[in-house]
C-alpha cells in the first residue's frame, strides 16, 4: 500500500503559509451545514505562531458581538483571509477539543462571542 508523509519542515512551511493567509483575517462561526452566519471574529495582524507544523492562534482579543442567533448552536467555522470573502479552510467548533474552541456554543444575537483556543495541524500524511 502506498503512503504519503510530509517532512516536519514542510509541514511547518505550510503552517506558516496558513498563518500568512490568516493574518488580519476572520473566523466566521455558523450553525450546522453553514446554514446561518452567527458571528464574524477578527484575527490579529499576526494571528498566531507556528511550531512543528501546527499553527496556534493568538486568542487575545478574539471576540465579537453576534449578528444573529435566537439563540442558535455554533456548529461549524470558516477561516477567511483579510478580505473577508476568501475562504482558507473550514473547521469544527466546540467548547473543547475542536479546531476552534469557543467559551459557549449557544449564541444569541448581540452576545459577545470569544475564541478561547484554536489550532490548525498540517497533517503528516497517510
Image: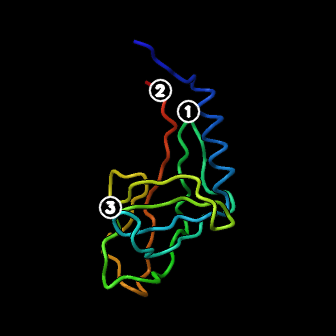
Category of crowding for the residue at label 3, using alpha-carbon neighbours closer than 10 angstroms: few (below 14), some (14–19), many (at least 20): some
Displayed quadrant of residue 80: bottom right
Instruction: Report helix, strand or loop for mark 3.
Output: loop
* Residue at x-position 48% and y-position 33%: 123
Q: Residue at x 47, y 83 (%)?
A: 67
Is 45 above or below relative to 15?
below
The answer for how far apart the CA atoms under marks 2 and 1 are is 14 Å
| Residue identifier under label 2 | 125
Q: Earlier in the sequence, mark 3 or mark 2?
A: 3
Q: Which element carries disc 2, helix, strand or loop? A: loop
Spatial CA distance of label 3 from label 2 is 27 Å
Give the residue number, with chain letter if any, for mark 3.
95
Report the Cα–Cα distance between label 3 and label 1. 25 Å
Q: Which structural element holds mark 1?
A: loop
Residue at 62% in and 37% down? 14
| Residue at numbered disc 1 | 52
Residue at the top extreme? Answer: 1
Say left or right for 93 vs 86: left
Residue 123 lies, with reference to residue 67, above or below; the image says: above
Cβ–Cβ under 8 Å for marks 3 and 2: no
Residue sitting at x 57%, y 22%: 7
Decide: is 26 above or below 13: below
Amino acid at each position: 500500500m502506498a503512503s504519503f508523509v510530509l517532512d516536519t519542515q514542510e509541514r511547518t512551511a505550510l503552517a506558516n503559509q496558513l498563518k500568512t493567509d490568516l493574518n488580519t483575517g476572520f473566523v466566521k462561526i455558523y450553525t450546522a451545514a453553514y446554514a446561518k452566519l452567527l458571528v464574524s471574529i477578527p484575527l490579529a495582524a499576526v494571528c498566531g505562531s507556528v511550531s512543528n507544523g501546527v499553527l496556534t492562534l493568538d486568542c487575545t482579543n478574539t471576540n465579537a458581538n453576534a449578528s444573529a442567533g435566537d439563540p442558535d448552536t455554533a456548529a461549524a467555522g470558516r477561516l477567511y483571509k483579510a478580505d473577508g470573502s476568501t475562504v482558507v479552510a473550514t473547521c469544527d467548533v466546540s467548547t473543547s477539543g475542536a479546531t476552534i474552541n469557543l467559551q459557549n456554543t449557544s449564541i444569541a444575537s448581540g452576545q459577545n462571542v470569544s475564541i478561547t483556543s484554536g489550532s490548525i495541524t498540517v497533517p503528516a500524511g497517510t
